[in-house]
């Protein structure tokens, strides 16, 4: 099976989990996923000062 064959069956929603967080969390993927998401959103927060330090997602996000 080729990647091109899989692509139509995959959603555009996926999660990137940093390997370092998996190690830090003792292979707990849910915890590592949460840390990865918080890490990413903190970078978004730094770039958008109007958020005033709050991490949140809108319906559009």
Image (cartoon, rainbow, N blue to C red):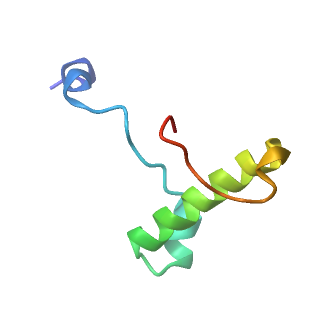
Q: Position of residue 18 (x, y in %)?
A: 55, 58
Report the residue that reaches farthest toward the top. Answer: 4
The number of discs equals 0
Residue depicted at 42% across the width and 75% down the height: 27
The part of the image, by quadrant, that contains residue 36 is: bottom right
Residue depicted at 21% across the width and 26% down the height: 6
Q: Is residue 1 above or below residue 14?
A: above
Residue depicted at 39% across the width and 43% down the height: 14
Q: Position of residue 32 (x, y in %)?
A: 49, 68
Residue depicted at 78% across the width and 59% down the height: 53
Horizontal arrangement in the rendering, residue 4 relative to residue 20 (left or right): left
Q: Quadrant of the N terminus?
A: top left
Q: Is residue 25 above or below residue 29?
A: below
Horizontal arrangement in the rendering, residue 30 relative to residue 48 (left or right): left
Q: Is residue 51 above or below residue 2?
A: below
44 or 22, nearer to the observer:
44
């Amino acid at each position: 099976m080729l990647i091109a064959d899989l692509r139509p069956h995959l959603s555009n929603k996926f999660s990137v989990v940093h390997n370092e967080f998996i190690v830090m969390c003792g292979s707990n993927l849910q915890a590592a996923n949460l840390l990865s998401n918080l890490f990413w959103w903190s970078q978004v927060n730094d770039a958008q000062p109007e958020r005033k330090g709050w991490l949140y997602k809108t319906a559009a996000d």
